[in-house]
Image (cartoon, helix red, strand yellow):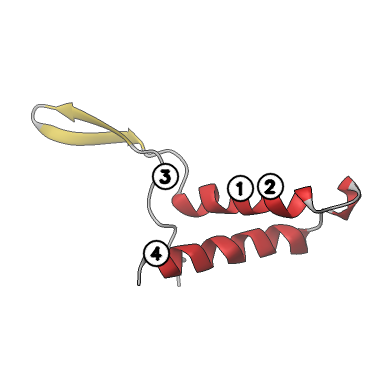
């Protein structure tokens, strides 16, 4: 099962021959949310070495929750 990534966060839409063309959708909304969540989590850390894969997973869990809430 593929996770809902929320679609592109900052899509660049170009028109060619009256058809939308999206050559570079940019980062996903999930990645954007996770980056912001991770920033907050890191800000609460005392030492940089406290950053673990568990912290990063938490950031993506927050992003997934935000996308789920957005879709309700």
Q: Which residue is situated farthest in the left direction here?
A: 18
- Label 1 vs label 2, nearer the camera: 2
Report helix, strand or loop for mark 3: loop
Q: Counting other residues with Cα less than 10 Å from the Cα at mark 1, is it few (<14), some (14-19), or many (20 or more)?
A: some
Q: Is residue 2 visible?
A: no
Q: Which residue is mark 4?
A: 70
Distance Cα–Cα, label 4 vs label 1: 17 Å
Residue at the image position 43 percent from the left and 38 percent from the top? 26
* Element carrying mark 2: helix
Of the residues under marks 2 and 3, which one precedes in the sequence? 3
Q: Secondary structure at mark 4?
A: helix
Identify the residue shown where x is 81% and y is 57%: 52
Q: Which image quadrant for residue 57? A: bottom right
Q: Pinpoint residue 42: horizontal percent, then vertical percent.
A: 76, 50
Mark 3–mark 4 contact, CB under 8 Å? Answer: no
16 relative position to 37: left or right: left
Q: Earlier in the sequence, mark 2 or mark 4?
A: 2
Distance of mark 3 from mark 4, alpha carbons?
A: 14 Å
User: What residue sits right under mark 2 in the picture?
Assistant: 39
Q: Are marks 1 and 2 in contact (CB under 8 Å)?
A: yes
Is the C terminus in the top left, top right, bottom left or bottom right quadrant?
bottom left
Q: Nearer the viewer, mark 3 or mark 4?
A: 4
Q: Return the residue at label 3.
A: 9
Binning the other alpha carbons within 10 Å of mark 3 as few (below 14), some (14 to 19) or many (20 upward) gives some
Earlier-in-chain disc, 3 versus 1: 3
Mark 4 burial class by Cα count in 10 Å: few <14, some 14-19, many 20+: few
């Amino acid at each position: 099962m593929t996770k809902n990534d929320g679609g592109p966060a900052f899509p660049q839409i170009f028109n060619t021959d009256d058809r939308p063309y999206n050559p570079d959708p940019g980062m996903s909304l999930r990645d954007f949310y996770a980056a912001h969540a991770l920033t907050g989590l890191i800000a609460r850390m005392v030492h940089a070495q406290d950053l673990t894969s568990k912290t990063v997973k938490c950031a993506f869990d927050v992003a997934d929750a935000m996308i789920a809430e957005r879709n309700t």
